[in-house]
Image (cartoon, grey):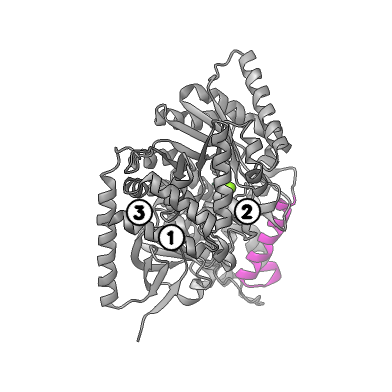
Amino acid sequence: MSTVKLTGIAASDGIAIAPVYLLTEPDLRFETKQTEDSQAEIARLEAAYAQAITEVSKIRDIAKESLGAEEAQVFEAHLLVLQDPEFTDQVKNHIETEKVNAEAALHQVSTFFINLFAGMEDNPYMQERAADIKDVSERVLAALLGVKLPSPATIDEEVIVIAHDLTPSDTAQLNKQFVKAFVTNIGGRTSHSAIMARSLEIPAIVGTKNVTEIVKDGDVLIVDALEGVVLVNPSQDEIAQYQEKAAAYDAQKAEWEKLVAAPSVTKDGHHVELAANIGTPKDVKGVLENGAEGIGLYRTEFLYMDASDFPTEDEQYEAYKAVLESMDGKGVVVRTMDIGGDKELPYLTLPREMNPFLGYRAIRISLDRTDMFKTQLRALLRASVHGNLRIMFPMIATLAEFRSAKAVLDATKAELVKEGVAVSEDIQVGIMIEIPAAAVLAHQFAKEVDFFSIGTNDLIQYTMAADRMNEQVSYLYQPYNPSILTLIKHVIDASHKEGKWTGMCGEMAGDQTAVPLLLGMGLDEFSMSATSVLKTRSLISKLNLTDMQALADKAINECTTAEEVVELVNAAVEAANA
Ligand code: PEP
Ligand code: MG
């Protein structure tokens, strides 16, 4: 019998072979039954509670060990609910008075409390308790029904996680030591869980459409996230073949590692800056290990997403200071928070939107909620004396937005100076170019900003009108489409004309087919997942700037499709390697 093969979008490089861990919604349906034997139901309930307490204690211990005390907090709260006699007594009472089975009594009592607490809109603490009761009741119900609940934080053997989708916060919970890869039904290369997988160095394939329907717990998979292929229950021969491929990939990585201290220069001596993208101060370790020359994008929204309330000015200051100090004078581009799109805050309830990527997001929120924005800017400005800080605003569409954001920054700086707080005099202020309107008017923006950083993840989705999260339209994520190349070239030229620089922090900056073109177009800084830095340095060292300039000109002026551009680049890279 031949092996079942699935394909998807390769989102984070690597090869893994391990059994499946299904992270899907469990089936917790039950029947309400009338029963006279209340004592037997109460005994079942007590046994289910005891099992749930054992499970949650184990989850708490593993989470503490692998993810830290803060991430484990939520499980402490669950234990408190499980051990609260008031709640259990009510369920027992219900079993006796209503003469129903334990499942029905538990469901009725927990639904009553969940609705009661969730409705306390001016009491966020009690609202959070509603979520705890829901989680805990599901666990007790699962124990009553004999159903296993998945829990990523407790994974303690090597597995491949299979899910319909993973949110950025699910992804943050995966322990790289045991999770060898993940595969999802939906998502695109630039969805934030894919971006995080790259910084965690977990191989990932997204957008397979139906992996959760095809594989079962216990199946063994080969995940080839270099090609975007999944093999279900492979033969011994296939396993041997992929073990060989994995070893060759490791050997290639070892070659790249030799370039960790080398400069990023082309064969004909042109230097570009290779920087890395980070989401948290912890990521700086990977940046330094991979020899990046700076940080081209610090996505500060993860600081907000990891917390249970808005991070305070001091908490933010500590994070920014830590990053600036560790980078020891190298440039650090910190982007003000970009909440919205696929990044939500549990404590900031925003109205449901039809098109979150076109909605209330990033600078639009910051300019509306200036209290929040100023807290972030104060923290950044205070941290500026600890390194080489560059501040960047996300999702700028108009010059008016940039001017407003800059005015808030200047006013915040003046306040701090008046308070006698030291602030660096040398902070560059730039914008993301990720909305076509800003790209088109780059020549006007270039007169007022210090730098641009092109966010191709959004720029491509907005230019092609193709949702970056939707695998059905992922064929339109076309970095090499001449339309995208033309926009990028315009932005780079516009900045140079005003003596400014342009970087790129979208995923395209580390794309090995795009790099020769970007080099030829004159891009000054390439910022990517830390794990892509060394292979990009290796590629650049084999190319001549003058050849790449001719290549980029040809791609923009003569090619009509992305495919033609790819052909052209492949031929040029082959010639350079010959
Ligand atoms: C981008 O849009 O290219 C970008 C770098 O920002 P984000 O992926 O966080 O939207
Ligand atoms: Mg973006």
308, 428: nearer the viewer: 428
Q: Nearer the viewer, mark 3 or mark 1?
A: 1
Circle 3 sits in a helix, a strand or a loop, which is it?
Answer: loop
Mark 2 Cα within 10 Å, few/some/many (few <14, many 20+)? some
Q: Is residue 106 magenta?
A: yes
Residue 287's spot in the image, x, y percent? 39, 40
Q: CA distance from mark 2 to mark 3?
A: 29 Å
Q: Which mark is residue 568?
A: 1
Residue 202's spot in the image, x, y percent? 40, 56
Q: CA distance from mark 3 to mark 1?
A: 40 Å
Name the image quarter holding residue 310.
top right
Residue 442's spot in the image, x, y percent? 63, 40
Name the image quarter holding the N terminus: bottom left
| Amino acid type, mark 3 | Gln
Instruction: Please provide the residue range marked out in magenta.
Output: 96-119
Q: Can you identify the residue that label 3 sits on? A: 177
Q: Is residue 559 magenta?
A: no
Q: Does residue 16 show up? A: yes
Q: Nearer the viewer, mark 2 or mark 3?
A: 3
Q: Can you identify the residue that label 2 sits on? A: 131
Residue 568's spot in the image, x, y percent? 43, 60
| Amino acid type, mark 1 | Leu
Q: With respect to residue 100, does 521 lie above or below?
A: above
Q: N-terminal of the two: label 1 or label 2?
A: 2
313, 277: nearer the viewer: 277
Query: What secondary structure predominates along the stretch shown in magenta?
Result: helix
Q: Does residue 510 show up? A: no
Q: N-terminal of the two: label 3 or label 1?
A: 3
